[in-house]
Image: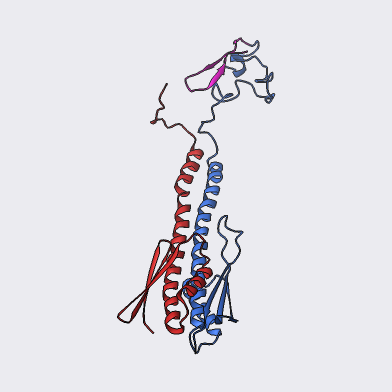
Amino acid sequence: MKRKKKNEKGIFEAKRRIRRCAGLGFDHADDRRACGFDVGSSGTGTQGSFRSGHAQGRFVLVQKATGQGGAAPIDFILTALPLLALTLSVMGLGLFSYCRNVSYDIAIESARWAALADQPVSAGCERAKFELALTLATSLSSQVRCEEKVTSGGRMLAVEITVEFPKLGLVSAVDPIKAVGHAFAEIQ
Amino acid sequence: MRLPKFSDEEGSAPIEFIGFGLLLQLPLLPLVLQFSSIQLEQLSAESMARNALRAYCVSAVPIATSIDLIARDFNLPATTRVSHSLTSEDGLLTLEVVVGEATAIAVGIEP
């Protein structure tokens, strides 16, 4: 087993006997180190044309993983993309929660509005559309449906709101927000 | 044991970038969820107080019935604490509704 020695840069160097190669000058790279054989050819596969003197610097074969070398654009892409997805996901989650809470509130308020005395059922839909335009972006596609039910407690009005949520980050598999508000009609 | 040199600049830039990115961004997640929960509780408390008292004054609908109906519509988690108290003073009804950490008060004229 060859002894390995750590140099001042923290890079390991295999100690090897140095001998001159015949026919090559002293300034030739191959003459200063291994004499013509392929570096690493006896161990794990290294390219046959790669000799010890071909690389810049003396000791590049074994390097620690903490090196700063690498392509900056690739580093940037590999790190920025996951972070961007994480940021957009957090923003998407916040937006989704806000839209859901506001939709619940609008559905209930609209049902209460339609339940007032002398109000037709369609008043709930109109109120819901008005409040949706005020609070949420008009570009969000939303559907409003109103209906009247007769229960044991009396006449009940229901307003159902469905809002298509914009896809942001990893929050792309969510279903549309569905909010239903109920209210007993006031005695007329 | 040799202590590490904290003044040393050596390290891996991508690992530092991801580490600090996660450290700075992951706390935002519980913050957003907490904000959403507080908003839901506050909206539902206000809606319960106003509409339950109105239904009680106008149509004599029991307050508990209205509160249960609104709590179902808001999809409140089963673990959320919902309580209410109705007081009467000088012909005025005061309904206080507590939903989780949120409190809302509505005042109406006694029928």
- Asked whether B109 or A145 is in front, the reply is B109
| x and y percentages locating residue A184 in the rendered image | 52, 80
Q: From which residue to which does the magenta span run?
A: A1-20
Query: Is A52 drawn above or below residue A76 in the view shown?
Result: above
- The residue positioned 61% from the left and 13% from the top of the image is A2
| A175 left or right of A186 in image | right
Which chain is the one coloured red? Answer: B
For the stretch drawn in magenta, the main secondary structure is loop
Residue A129 visible somewhere in the drawing: no
Q: Is residue B97 left or right of residue A16?
A: left
**Compared with residue A74, is residue A186 higher up or lower down, i.e. above or below?**
below
Quarter of the rendering containing residue A18: top right
Residue A100 visible in the picture? yes
Q: Residue at position x 53%, y 69% from top?
A: B72
Pick the quarter of the image with the N terminus of chain B: top left
Residue A8 magenta-highlighted: yes
Judging from the image, what is the letter of the chain drawn in blue?
A: A
Q: Residue at x 55, y 59 (%)?
A: A168
Q: Position of residue A90 (x, y in %)?
A: 50, 55
x and y, in percent, of residue B89 in the image: 31, 78
Q: Quadrant of the C terminus of chain B?
A: bottom left
